[in-house]
Image: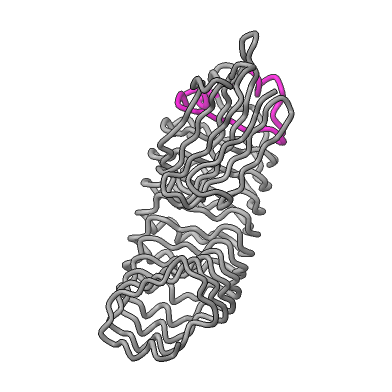
């Protein structure tokens, strides 16, 4: 209600995980003492009022609602803001350049909206930013070179947009980056050699673009890399021999390019990524897509009598698809997906003998058991 604006001394407002509906009242801007505004996972609709710029908040979380309209430029007045979570709404329009004024920002989640237009170069001013999630929107244009100024970034998620042009060489300045995810865009040109400067990179996914030319030899410097996903581009061979230095690699996907089948097979074999099982076993492929709290996610496989067969726990990367193959005996019958926080955020796709089993994120609470008997 509009009367919420009368609570001028309130410092913390948390009404999350309810069934609140209606709009966010403009009077909320009178609550100038509020430092944390948590209204996520409700059914709030309408626009985000420009008066939100009057708050002194360091954390605003309105994700998982039905907010629409544009992100007001007044958000740039939130000089103390560290966390801005507006993902999974129906926000549209362009990102205001005033976002670049938020020098204290550490995390920005604006994914799963319908934002359009280009990325403002002013975002390069966000030198404290560690996580930028803008995936599943309709953003277009080039990735600005100023992205290289966001030197604290650990996760850059721009996938499933309509971004074009080259991957700027300045991405090599992001030396804290652990996850670079740009798949399903229209990025072209070559992969810059500066990619080899990203010593901490664990996950590189450029699937489904129009990247061309050969891979730079500097890719062999990414010695911590675990996932290299480049399929569905126009990359050509030969594959650099330096790729064999990626001894921690767990997944290599390069199909749908111009590499020869022989060199792909030889590289896969040399990296120890070819896979076969013993007699009496079958291959199971498991793709787990983590939520915002990956450490809470685990899974296990049990035989019909409850004997443990395989398990994984303790994921570290957020909102990323983790691929794993395991050999399991024929009597493996139960796959259990566990979410320790009981919010059912992660999703999983399991393939065994051509049959696909799917568990949707948000479709369970603390755990779900799938019958995988054959």
Q: Quadrant of residue 215?
A: top right
Can residue 339 be seen? yes
Vertical order, 70 against 133 (above or below): below
Q: Residue at x 64, y 57 (%)?
A: 164
Quadrant location, the C terminus: top right
Residue lying farthest top? 279
Residue 93: percent from left, percent from top? 60, 75
Residue furthest left as drawn: 9
Q: In the rendered image, which quarter contains the N terminus? A: bottom left
Residue 239, percent across and down?
Answer: 61, 27
Q: Is residue 140 visible?
A: no
Indicate whether 261 appears above or below 200: above
Between residue 175 and residue 63, name the one nearer to us.
Answer: 63
The residue at 42%/67% (across/down) is 84
Residue 51, image x, y percentages: 42, 86
Q: Is 213 displayed left or right of 103 in the figure?
A: right
> Image point 62% across, 33% down: which residue?
253
In the image, the segment drawn in magenta is 241-267
Q: Is residue 260 magenta?
A: yes
Residue pictured at 52% horizontal, 46% vertical: 346
Q: Is residue 348 above or below residue 133?
A: above
């Amino acid at each position: 209600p509009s009367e919420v604006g009368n609570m001028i001394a309130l410092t913390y407002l948390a009404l999350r995980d309810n069934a609140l509906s209606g709009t966010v009242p403009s009077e909320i801007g009178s609550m100038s003492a509020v430092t944390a505004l948590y209204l996520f996972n409700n059914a709030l609709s309408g626009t985000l009022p420009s008066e939100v710029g009057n708050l002194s908040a360091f954390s605003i979380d309105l994700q998982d609602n039905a907010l629409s309209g544009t992100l007001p430029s007044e958000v740039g007045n939130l000089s103390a803001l560290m966390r801005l979570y507006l993902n999974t709404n129906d926000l549209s329009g362009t990102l205001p350049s005033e976002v670049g004024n938020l020098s204290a920002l550490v995390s920005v989640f604006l994914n799963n909206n319908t934002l359009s237009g280009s990325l403002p170069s002013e975002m390069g001013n966000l030198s404290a930013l560690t996580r930028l999630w803008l995936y599943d929107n309709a953003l277009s244009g080039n990735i600005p070179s100023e992205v290289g100024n966001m030197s604290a970034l650990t996760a850059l998620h721009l996938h499933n947009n309509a971004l074009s042009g080259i991957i700027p060489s300045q991405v090599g300045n992001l030396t804290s980056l652990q996850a670079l995810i740009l798949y399903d865009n229209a990025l072209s040109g070559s992969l810059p050699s500066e990619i080899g400067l990203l010593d901490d990179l664990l996950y590189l996914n450029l699937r489904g673009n129009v990247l061309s030319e050969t891979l730079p030899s500097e890719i062999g410097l990414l010695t911590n890399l675990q996932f290299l996903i480049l399929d569905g581009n126009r990359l050509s061979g030969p594959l650099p021999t330096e790729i064999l230095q990626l001894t921690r690699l767990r997944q290599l996907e390069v199909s749908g390019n111009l590499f020869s089948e022989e060199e792909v097979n030889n590289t896969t074999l040399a990296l120890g990524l070819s896979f076969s099982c013993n007699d009496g076993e079958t291959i199971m492929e498991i793709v787990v897509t983590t939520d915002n709290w990956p450490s809470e996610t685990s899974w296990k496989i049990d035989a019909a009598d409850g004997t443990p067969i395989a398990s994984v726990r303790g994921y570290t990367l957020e909102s990323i698809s983790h691929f794993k193959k395991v050999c399991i005996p024929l009597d493996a019958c139960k796959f259990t997906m566990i979410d320790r926080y009981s919010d059912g955020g992660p999703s999983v796709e399991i393939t065994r003998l051509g049959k696909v089993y799917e568990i949707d994120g948000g479709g369970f609470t603390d755990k779900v058991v799938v019958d995988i008997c054959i």
